[in-house]
Image (spheres, rainbow, N blue to C red):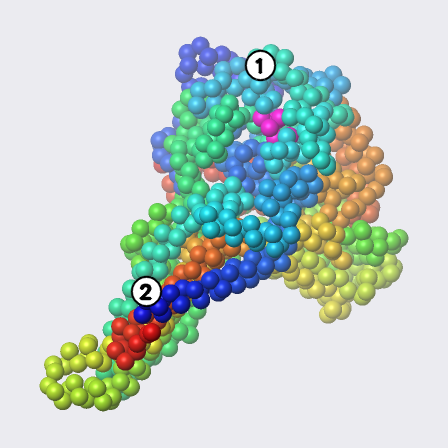
Amino acid sequence: MRGATHAGRVACAVAVALTATACGGGGGNSGSGDAGAVLSASWGDPQNPLEPANTNEVQGGKVLDMIFRGLKRYDPETGEAQDMLAESIETTDSQNFTVTVKDGWTFSNGEKVTAKSFVDAWNYGASLKNNQRNAYFFGYIEGYDKTHPEEGGQSADTLSGLKVTGDLTFTVKLTQKFSTFPDTLGYAAFAPLPRAFFDDHDAWVAKPVGNGPYAVDTYAKGSQMSLRKWDDYPGDDKARNGGVDLKVYTDNNTAYTDLLAANLDLVDDVPASQLKNVKSDLGDRYLNTPAGIIQTLAFPYYDENWNRTGSEKVRKGLSMAINRKQITETLFMKTRTPATDWTSPVLGEDGGFQEGLCGDACEYDPAGAKKLIQEGGGLPGGKVTLTYNADTGSHKDWVDAVCNSINNALGNERACAGNPVGTFADFRNQITQQKMSGPFRAGWQMDYPLIQNFLQPLYYTDASSNDGKWSNKNFDEFVDRANQETDTAKAVGLFQQAEGVVRDNMAAIPLWYQNGSAGWSERLSDVKLNPFSVPVYDQIKVS
Amino acid sequence: MGRYVVRRLLQMIPVFVGATLLIFLMVNVMGDPIAGLCGERRCDPATAAQLEKEFGLDKPVWQQYLTYMGNVFTGDFGTAFNGQEVTELMATAFPVTIRLTVIAILFEIVVGIALGVVTGLRRGRPVDTGVLLLTLVVISVPTFVTGLLLQLLLGVKWGWIRPSVSSEAPFDELILPGLVLASVSLAYVTRLTRTSIAENRRSDYVRTAVAKGLPRHRVITRHLLRTSLIPVVTFIGADIGFLMGGAIVTERIFNIHGVGYQIYQGILRQNTQTVVGFVTVLVLVFLVANLVVDLLYAVLDPRIRYA
């Protein structure tokens, strides 16, 4: 199956090289769509400059997904990592990889995409002096400790683990075995960069140039970006519309109003307050599908109240006191699904998602909750405070609902209270300075659809997002073994065993899986959301 | 007159320094802005340190403030976290907000003062009572309710206007947002003018003007209205500053990318450079508007002289 598509792509690439014509795959312009028509879509102002290794939020990610194609690409429907620019990625020991780049690809300014385009981009991302927020993605590559030391100046500008061996081949040497490394290469940080990026960086940031199906036409920072179909795009996922105008909205309610007034074609974040109207307003022009996002409550394990024997019973009790079903149905109008494990349904069974792994501990059971908390020695100080940031995402509503649920279950009006923090930055600040005294909001949006991404960054000892500083030898051991395992199925199995350790200790309380939502105008068809809850712009047809 | 202006300009300096210092300290108290830049994870310490150095956050606050003020006087307002110069943000945001403010002020002056004169001259009549009731309603309904309601009715239900303003924000698209923004102040201007007119109608100089046989419209425009405008001008002068900085709600509803939007985003992202930069300019606007108002007093009322 995989081999067949692979061969098809090769033939396509050869055809492009010989005749320099477009290779429309998958029935490109068939159907009712007008291939020249442009659609408008809602957008938010990206937080950081639009460089691939510097973008860690969805809004910037949307653009990168349109203007870049990496070695791998996650299938918009299944999330499976498939070869894109990679002709092959070979390894015998899960530590040394040989990458061959497909021939015939260029950037939209005409530059050829070569092995050097990747190696230069990755070196740039890993170099401390460039302040790239996603630098840690290169942390597995040998030499990262020289280009990006924890302290002090860098002693090298390039990663010693990357070597260009030919025009289209390069080798990667990792510091440890990491069997699923090739599958992480679909992340935007691993995108290739043209020489233009390095030669005139300011001009590039003002108007980014990539190798994806769209090219940036105009970019007015803070208000609008116009992307147009790149006609000479060599891939088989050519845009089926003429382009996309991304418009910055400060308030997603305004975007929704604009959609109703036929002033905007696509909204990819329907505001919570409009969910009850969405059926009558849009009918079937509304989509609500699972995304790779899970919301949990994390605990401060640096606080001895939460790190003593018996406290796992308190955590389990708290988990059982939360009526997930009621909250997701009434408050979120089913745009969230009660969580029963610590990953996400978008991974699929083969990818490691285990429905019901949490078992009774995630079922609402007021009596059992009360009993377990008592057995565990009661709530520390007689009550818990849930800390959250109040500036975005209507977190206040659900935190209050969770607290109500806990209070009702325990029959104590003061068992739980919310503790709002004004801004996200301050919230993160208090977390990094380990100032939490009770559970706090922890959301996780996957970087790539692998079970590893849901576990290692969050629960491995001293991992980058292990905010509660949870540490467990058994868990770490399972993860280490899984990363060394060359067989994917076996690796997933080991990760699932590690997840079992998380469950037994209730390291974090899983709350719900978040869905992505989108609404669109009558002009559009074939609107889909990928597992990252970003619309698949290139497949949208405009009439 | 000249000496008065110079004295006022000199008084502005300590006010300006004090105001910017306060804003600077307030934004600083909110904590480390770098922590919010890495999403739901800890920034790796090396990058965080590097960023702090780049934005000058590793220095003590007083030193940051001095450097900042030094740069401001050379026209450098620093760089926002998304890599844009703050001056560049100002260049895109201020023209939009100025257009919006001009429309709002025009509404206040034309509609507000006209209604005030009409009602002031016809106290107790049905017109007066009607307008009074109307202003009461406008004052008591919050701006976001008026804004959302008008947006829904005119933009979605009847389709007369676009519900949101495009990124170029031309004058015609800003008429409705400008009216919404001006609505509350407009009601106040009407009431202020009405009271003032009604009071001055009975004054000696108006009686004299009428007695010497001047035509009615001349009495009203030259004698009655001119002196009655003093409290109104004070109000409108102070309002210019409020409208420019306080348009956050209106700008959000109509998706206008002006000053309010930039400040709001700056606060959320704890972007000291953006917030302090914009507020500094707003402080200047306030100070200048106040000076102009004080000078206008002398023009309006011949009894007031500055030395």
| Image position of A42 with respect to A119: above or below | below
Are the residues tagged 2 and 1 within 8 Å (C-beta)?
A: no
Which residue is found at the position 11% from the left and 81% from the top?
B215
Q: Position of residue A121 (x, y in %)?
A: 58, 26
Q: Which mark is residue A168?
A: 1
Say whether residue A313 is magenta: no
Which contiguous range is marked in magenta? A121-126
Q: Residues within 10 Å of mark 1 (few under 14, many from 20)?
A: some
Closest to the observer: B27 or A6? B27
Between disc 2 and disc 1, the foreground one is 2
The kind of residue on which mark 1 rests is Leu
Q: Is residue A186 shown left or right of residue A310?
A: left
Q: Which mark is residue B105?
A: 2
The kind of residue on which mark 2 rests is Ile
Q: Give the image quarter of residue B101.
A: bottom left
| Image position of A171 with respect to B299: above or below | above
